[in-house]
Image (tube, rainbow, N blue to C red):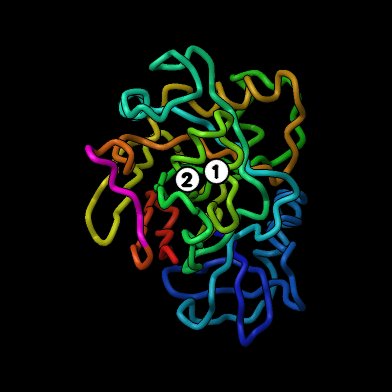
Amino acid sequence: MKLITFELEGAVAAGYVDGADAVVCVEGDGARRGVLDAVIGGRDVLAKWKSSNGKRIPLADVRLLAPIPDPLRDVFCVGKNYYAHAAEFHSSGFDSSAKEQVPSHPVIFTKATTSVCGPGDVVKGSLDHTNSVDYEGELGVVIAKRCFQVSKQDAYDHVFGYVTVNDVTSRILQKDHNQWVIGKGIDTFCPIGPWIATADEVGDVTELELVTEINGEERQRAKVADLIFDIPTLIETMSRTMTLLPGDIIATGTPVGVGIGFKPPRYLSSGDKMSVSITGLGTLENTIG
């Protein structure tokens, strides 16, 4: 099932994608929390959604928003989680996080809830006064239920589904402030979407392939299987000391090919078009403003 939040005739609604080109509207009346409530409610709510007699609408007639436009908490993110990207970032001169090229433990940071935006939204690159905007296509994991001290063996039981994330970053701010919150948490610097696909629909998540294009030029291509710390390890590590909540989003890291890896760096400018596609999760497109 592919859950979406969208605008139709100026009103916010929630529902799911049916087939290739239709939307079933399940909740209207400003349902910005509709998908989040479905995640929290789990199987019972999804069963009600599937059996609903919601209005069918052509997908082309709606404007998709981030599936969870207003997350309850910051988006959790993982740094340097593909081997080749860890090498390119470490050698870029901008890695202030550690002396290790390949981390011995997951590098975790967060992006503010106010950084979240949706498909087609303009990413406000103008907010970065250093003019060092970069892209990072990533797979996002959506937590299904409250979890604390979950083992790797049980980790997938706590996954609701998956979504595409673009961890847009100001590289100079990321470097200057050492910790990454300011460089990563800029308003609109976390596009998410176009939908959350439930875990049962995705199947073997390690087989998914991510592709990022900038102005039509392919920059990144990798499989989820190439992660240094896989999804069960991330959930086990994070939940060892803190509770993860339903609706939490974990962005699992970006592969090699980001702008900072080029010599000289290829930063983004106003008008540049970013496209991040993941198998079965659609394409997340945004323009730099």
Q: Is residue 100 magenta?
A: no
Please state which of residues 236 and 111 is positioned toward the viewer in this rendering.
111
- Where residue 89 appears, as percent x and y from the top left, is 36, 29
Q: Which tag, 1 or 2, sits closer to the chain's start?
A: 2
Residue found at x 26% / y 46%? 219
Amino acid marked by disc 2:
Thr
Q: Main secondary structure of the magenta part?
A: loop
Figure check: 62 above or below 247: below
Assign the N terminus to one quadrant of the image. bottom right
| Residue type marked 1 | Lys
Residue 184's disc number: 1
Q: What element carries label 2?
A: strand
10 Å crowding of disc 2: few (<14), some (14-19), many (20+): many
Q: Residue at x 66, y 34 (%)?
A: 158
- The residue identified by callout 2 is 169
**Range of magenta residues:** 263-269
Residue 40 located left or right of residue 142:
right
User: What x and y, as percent, mark residue 123?
Assistant: 49, 62
**Local crowd at mark 1 within 10 Å, few (<14), some, or many (≥20)?**
many
Residue 73 falls in which quadrant of the image? Answer: top right
Q: Does the magenta stretch include residue 266?
A: yes
